[in-house]
Amino acid sequence: MSDSADNQAKELANTSNPKLVYILYLVGILLGFTGIIGVIIAYINKSDAPEWIQSHYRFQIRTFWIGLLYSVIAMILTTVIVGFFVLVFVLIWLIIRCVKGMKYLDKGEAYPEPSSWMF
């Protein structure tokens, strides 16, 4: 195998962990605890990854912490009914972020704005 083929194979292999994190976040909608596993994987692999994959890990880490913040706010607001709408927003927000992240990952592209609070 040539060096470029080796590098390409290595780059493709590196996408399995970030993809796993996105999947764990989506499964976390039903099971809850898998999101914690996903953020741990993102923290562990972030420093060793190529720059474009690091952008996905940064995005995933921020997705976890921002999602947790939004969820806590929503839980507090459930006492005044509004929180239930915020919880629905958080659910949709998480799904959109994970799907967009996987889309960029499948294309082999860095996430364009990993520090974004929205989508």
Image: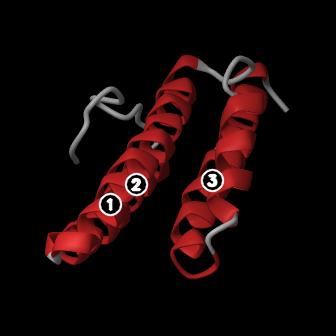
Q: Observer-nearest residue: 62 or 4? A: 62
Q: Secondary structure at mark 3?
A: helix
Task: Please tell me whether mark 2 or mark 1 is closer to you in this view.
Answer: 1
Q: Determine the image quadrant of residue 14.
A: top right
What's under tag 3, amino acid-wise?
Val
Which residue has dot 2 on it?
72
Q: Secondary structure at mark 1?
A: helix
Residue that extends furthest to the bottom in the rendered view of this protein = 30
Asked if the residue under mark 3 is in contact with the one under mark 1, i.e. CB atoms within 8 Å, the reply is: no
Q: Residues within 10 Å of mark 3 (few under 14, many from 20)?
A: many
Give the residue drawn at x 74%, y 53%. Answer: 37
Q: From the viewer's perspective, is residue 101 above or below residue 51?
A: below
What's under tag 2, amino acid-wise?
Val
Give the residue drawn at x 59%, y 74%. Answer: 27
Q: How is the image coloured?
A: secondary structure
Quadrant for the N terminus in the image = top right
Q: From the viewer's perspective, is residue 84 above or below residue 64?
A: below
Give the residue drawn at x 73%, y 41%. Answer: 40
Which residue has dot 3 on it?
21
Q: Could one spot residue 5 in this view of the protein?
A: no
What's under tag 1, amino acid-wise?
Ile
Task: Please tell me whether mark 1 or mark 3 is closer to you in this view.
Answer: 1
Which residue has dot 1 on it?
76
Q: Could one spot residue 94 in this view of the protein?
A: yes
Asked if the residue under mark 1 is in contact with the one under mark 2, i.e. CB atoms within 8 Å, the reply is: yes
Give the residue drawn at x 41%, y 31%. Answer: 110
Q: Residues within 10 Å of mark 2 (few under 14, many from 20)?
A: some
